[in-house]
Image (tube, rainbow, N blue to C red):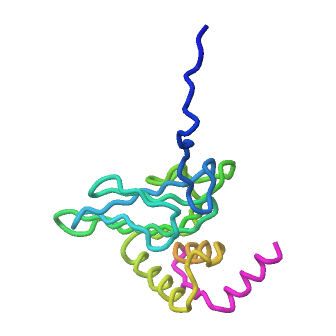
């Protein structure tokens, strides 16, 4: 008769590390980041990952809970100068939500704002700085504002400012949900 090996009763129980605010089966979104001096800088402008993993000297990744907001900036260059500027404000999703496939984001996310090119990126960054100057964490800003900013940017219209009053109205609406 084949018997299973017995584990000593004084052995410590096997435990898996828990992430803060997450259970072991919480689906996380993985955001790839990279830095190679004078070649590529793929970084988070804002966002609160639950965990960051260093893969090697140049690459890392950040893990986010569902419904988290984040901003990823991509800058690339070659021997002749800058070749790409990109800024994306994203919202991570739950497993059954509709997501967009985005390179470097697994399994995907909702794209709230997409700025491509130095001029567009340089016009969005001061908006983020202004929000932080107001004492508001950019991850707490209304997703509708980021969508509006992205639509105005693509239509080449003046960009709206995020105000304390707009933020208070958004928070009041969230309480009513």
Q: Position of residue 40 (x, y in %)?
A: 29, 63
Residue 91 location (% of width, % of height): 59, 64
Left or right of residue 153: residue 76: left
Please tell me which residue is depicted at 46% across the width and 70% down the height of the picture.
115
- In the image, 61 versus 16, the foreground residue is 16
Quadrant (top left, top right, bottom left, bottom right) of the C terminus: bottom right
- Name the residue rendered at 64%, 63% in the picture: 67
Residue 66 within the segment the image draws in magenta? no
The structure residue drawn at horizontal position 21% and vertical position 69%, both measured from the top left corner, is 81
Query: On screen, 140 above or below 102?
Result: below
Most extreme residue toward the front is: 10
Query: Is residue 166 inside the magenta stretch?
Result: yes
Q: Position of residue 71 (x, y in %)?
A: 49, 69
Task: Report the residue that reaches farthest toward the right.
Answer: 176
- Near-viewer residue (65 or 3): 3
> From which residue to which does the magenta span run?
155-177
Question: Which quadrant is the N terminus positioned in?
Answer: top right
């Amino acid at each position: 008769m084949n018997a299973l090996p017995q584990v000593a009763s004084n052995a410590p129980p096997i435990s898996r590390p828990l992430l803060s605010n997450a259970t072991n089966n919480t689906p996380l979104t993985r955001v790839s980041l990279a830095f190679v001096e004078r070649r590529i800088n793929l970084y988070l402008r804002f966002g609160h990952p639950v965990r960051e993993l260093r893969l090697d000297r140049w690459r890392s990744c950040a893990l986010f809970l569902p419904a988290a907001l984040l901003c990823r900036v991509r800058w690339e260059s070659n021997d002749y100068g800058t070749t790409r500027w990109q800024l994306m404000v994203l919202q991570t999703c739950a497993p059954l939500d509709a997501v967009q496939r985005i390179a470097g984001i697994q399994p995907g996310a909702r794209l709230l704002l997409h700025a491509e090119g130095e001029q567009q990126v340089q016009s969005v960054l001061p908006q983020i700085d202004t929000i932080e100057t107001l004492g508001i964490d950019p991850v707490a800003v209304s997703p509708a504002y980021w969508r509006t900013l992205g639509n105005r940017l693509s239509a080449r219209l003046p960009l709206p400012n995020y105000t304390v009053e707009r933020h208070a109205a958004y928070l009041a609406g969230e309480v009513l949900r």
